[in-house]
Image: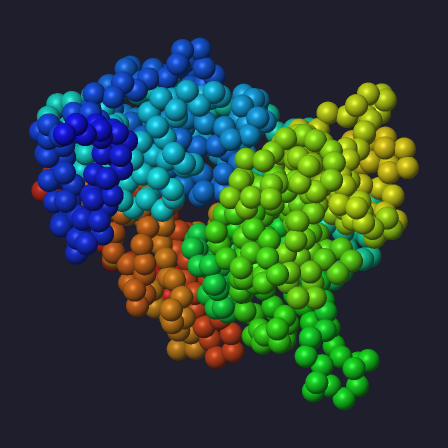
């Protein structure tokens, strides 16, 4: 009986899944290494994999490339282990794997035999444009080569099925692994180590360099870089998330910058305004005139800025991406995933039964979060509250409240049964929370009375159809948007304004009719204003002036709603004292938050590092909270046994193996340590860098190949300081 031949990609998916299962079941590093060694030997000899090995994979000619000086045909990369990252730049899951790929590239540069190539395979029409891809490359700090496969030719030719997908090619160019979705970082890192070792022993690895050249441009004259959301307080001050500069700016209606919080370098640090660090913050909102809540997106954290105290603190999030879709832990113990926008407000408890005088019931704070990474709306409750269905929410709890975590455009009377697709913008209107649901290209709303989720405009009646996008004004489902990222409510008109981001337009929704139309905004010369992926909106107190974050144009536009005339709203940084310049704050950060230790890094072929963290009696490690270390950087000659891990009972161990052929002029290792600690009254986070610098004065002395250096480092932590003993 004739049988259908197996699809090569089905074979590849099956063998990859089988290998991942064996990897997960392996008890330790030795067993994991054997799993890969067995696989590689079998892969070389297995005739059953012939349909996969015979696949012809190549890029089309004449495609746009980024971060390289010339195209890189795959046939020119024979001798390299190649990881093809099929991604589209709007996709939150694709964003999540970028740090994993960056860590992989740091460990294995092209000279070691590994090449990572991003194959941009667009979902939206807007994403086919090379200029928009270039902006995304700069915004996300992508340093590996990227090719714009605008027609998804390679995707279709080999049968890729989802974003993101990682296809690993052997040095001969044949597919070896197909990893779909996110969360494969540790597996891919371990596989790469063994595969490079395997093929290097066979003499099949090419150690030549690549023609890399980062696709960068100058910082804009406005001193903004990819501005995201804008918010206004009741007293009329404004805040903007200056995402590309990893900071928050506070300014007045004349554009005078009053506070600059954070610095031009990314980080995850609490403290005063000069010391604090963010990582690509997107959303923010004022809880009151003194308190600003920030969605610190790439730190996967909620941060609070207290203006009068000039302090930044972490409310929720560990600094590492979480996968929890329920929540409930308190404060920084709760891991979250890519918070994108904030709606902060105050309201009374819904249960009034225990109050003698209902006129004097105090209002309590609620922070709603568009949790793009898990496709949900979460809540953070600083004071605790009784809310929908008389649910008791504890003080400092961070909880999923709307959406089941499935990536769908599903409306429902019960908030936990609804589903979103990368919610990215929030606005509170009259009894409703309005949501820009970017991947379904729709605007939706939630009743603030009972949590019922309803459609407004855009998307499709089929909750599984996330490709119902376009540029059509109209009513409800007949209207079409393209990846909207921001909404704002105008109380004077009872209308919702939308940043229809990938259509480069601002639109307005009549809440009474659920109809949307495009605003015909003109520039100062009277010509139609050309936006570039606008992502933030905010009205002034009068409702007559609309502030627009024109994100990829690196500017803020101010629109007079009576005339629809716009002008560039320029920020004035002259009021900021010279002492708080980015250069000086970065210097303060480096000197105050880094522990330096001199170690003879060049001396031995192997370095074993043992770090022992000692707490004073009033402190203890928070139970069930992550205590993590991450390798931020190491010189090419040092190969680390791992790039991240847990700190157990204050102890961490890390091994570096020396490659004497890669000796740079200066040797350095930088580790990031993130600790969750508690004292008698509260829990807190301590985060700092441990920097090992080379103390070997004789840089020309050859490496002792029989030498193993055991280095013990004791770090003492008190509530007020961190020191190396």
Q: Quadrant of residue 302?
A: bottom right
| Number of marks | 0
Residue 636 or residue 341, whichever sits in front: 341
Residue occupying image coordinates x 21% and y 20%: 54
Q: Position of residue 164 (x, y in %)?
A: 41, 37
* Location of residue 79 with respect to 420 vertically, above or below: above
Q: Position of residue 108 (x, y in %)?
A: 29, 33
Is 611 left or right of 88, judged from the image as shown? left
Q: Quadrant of residue 380?
A: bottom right
Residue occupying image coordinates x 70% and y 85%: 353
Residue 337 or residue 214, whichever sits in front: 337
Q: Quadrant of the N terminus?
A: top left
Is 209 left or right of 279, judged from the image as shown? left
* Location of residue 5 with respect to 540 vertically, above or below: above
Residue at the extreme top of the image, as rendered = 62
Residue occupying image coordinates x 66% and y 40%: 477
Q: Position of residue 388 (x, y in %)?
A: 63, 70
């Amino acid at each position: 009986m004739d049988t259908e031949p197996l699809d090569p990609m089905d074979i590849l998916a099956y063998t990859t899944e089988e290998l991942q299962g064996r990897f997960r079941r392996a008890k330790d590093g030795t067993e994991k290494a054997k799993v890969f060694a067995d696989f590689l030997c079998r892969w070389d000899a297995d005739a059953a994999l012939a349909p996969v090995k015979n696949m012809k994979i190549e890029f089309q000619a004449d495609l746009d490339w980024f971060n390289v000086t010339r195209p890189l045909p795959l046939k020119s990369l024979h001798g390299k282990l190649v990881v093809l990252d099929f991604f589209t730049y709007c996709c939150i899951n694709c964003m999540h794997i970028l740090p994993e790929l960056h860590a992989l590239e740091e460990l294995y540069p092209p000279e070691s035999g590994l090449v990572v190539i991003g194959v941009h395979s667009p979902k939206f029409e807007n994403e086919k444009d090379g200029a928009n891809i270039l902006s995304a490359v700069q915004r996300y700090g992508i340093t590996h080569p990227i090719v714009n496969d605008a027609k998804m030719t390679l995707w279709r030719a080999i049968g890729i099925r989802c974003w993101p997908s990682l296809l690993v090619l052997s040095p001969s160019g044949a597919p070896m692994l197909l990893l779909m979705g996110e969360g494969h970082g540790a597996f891919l890192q371990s596989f790469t180590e063994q595969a490079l070792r395997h093929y290097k022993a066979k003499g099949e690895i090419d150690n030549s360099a690549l023609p890399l050249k980062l696709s960068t441009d100058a910082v804009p004259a406005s001193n903004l870089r990819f501005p995201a959301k804008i918010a206004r307080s009741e007293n009329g001050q404004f805040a903007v998330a200056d995402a590309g500069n990893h900071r928050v700016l506070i300014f007045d209606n004349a554009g005078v910058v009053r506070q600059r919080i954070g610095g031009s370098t990314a980080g995850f640090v609490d403290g005063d305004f000069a010391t604090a660090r963010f990582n690509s913050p997107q959303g923010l909102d004022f809880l009151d005139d003194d308190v600003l809540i920030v969605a610190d997106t790439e730190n996967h954290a909620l941060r609070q800025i207290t203006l009068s105290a000039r302090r930044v603190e972490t409310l929720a999030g560990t600094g590492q991406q979480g996968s929890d879709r329920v929540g409930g832990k308190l404060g920084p113990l709760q891991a979250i995933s890519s918070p994108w926008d904030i709606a902060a407000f105050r309201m009374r408890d819904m249960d009034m039964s225990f109050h003698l005088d209902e006129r004097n019931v105090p209002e309590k704070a609620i922070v709603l979060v568009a949790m793009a990474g898990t496709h949900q709306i979460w809540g953070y409750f600083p004071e605790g509250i009784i809310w929908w269905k008389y649910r008791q929410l504890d003080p400092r709890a961070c909880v999923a409240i709307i959406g089941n975590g499935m990536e769908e455009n599903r409306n429902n009377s019960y908030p936990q049964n609804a589903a979103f697709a990368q919610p990215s913008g929030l606005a509170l209107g009259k009894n409703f929370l309005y949501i820009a649901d970017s991947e379904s290209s729709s605007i939706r709303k939630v009743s603030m009375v009972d949590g019922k989720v309803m459609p407004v405009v855009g998307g499709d009646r089929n909750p599984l159809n996330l490709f119902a996008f376009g540029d059509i004004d109209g009513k409800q489902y007949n209207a079409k948007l393209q990846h909207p990222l921001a909404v704002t409510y105008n109380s004077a008109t009872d209308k919702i304004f939308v940043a229809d981001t990938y259509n480069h337009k601002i639109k307005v929704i009549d809440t009474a009719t659920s109809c949307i139309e495009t605003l015909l905004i003109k520039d100062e010369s009277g010509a139609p204003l050309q936006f570039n992926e606008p992502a933030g909106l905010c009205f002034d107190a009068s409702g007559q002036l609309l502030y627009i974050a024109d994100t990829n144009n690196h500017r803020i536009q101010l629109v007079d709603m009576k005339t629809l005339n716009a002008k560039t709203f320029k920020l004035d940084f002259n009021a900021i004292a010279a002492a708080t310049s980015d250069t000086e704050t970065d210097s303060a950060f480096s000197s105050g938050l880094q522990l330096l230790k001199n170690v003879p890094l060049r001396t031995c072929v192997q370095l074993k590092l043992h770090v022992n963290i000692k707490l004073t009696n009033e402190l203890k490690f928070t139970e069930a909270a992550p205590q993590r270390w991450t390798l931020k950087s190491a010189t090419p000659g040092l190969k680390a046994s791992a790039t991240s891990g847990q700190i157990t009972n204050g102890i961490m161990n890390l091994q570096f193996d020396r490659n004497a052929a890669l000796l740079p002029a200066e040797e350095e290792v930088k580790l990031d340590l993130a600790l969750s600690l508690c004292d008698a009254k509260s829990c807190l986070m301590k985060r700092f860098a441990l920097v090992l610098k080379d103390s070997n004065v004789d840089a020309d002395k050859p490496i002792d190949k029989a030498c193993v250096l055991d280095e013990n480092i004791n770090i003492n932590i008190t509530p007020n300081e961190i020191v190396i003993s």
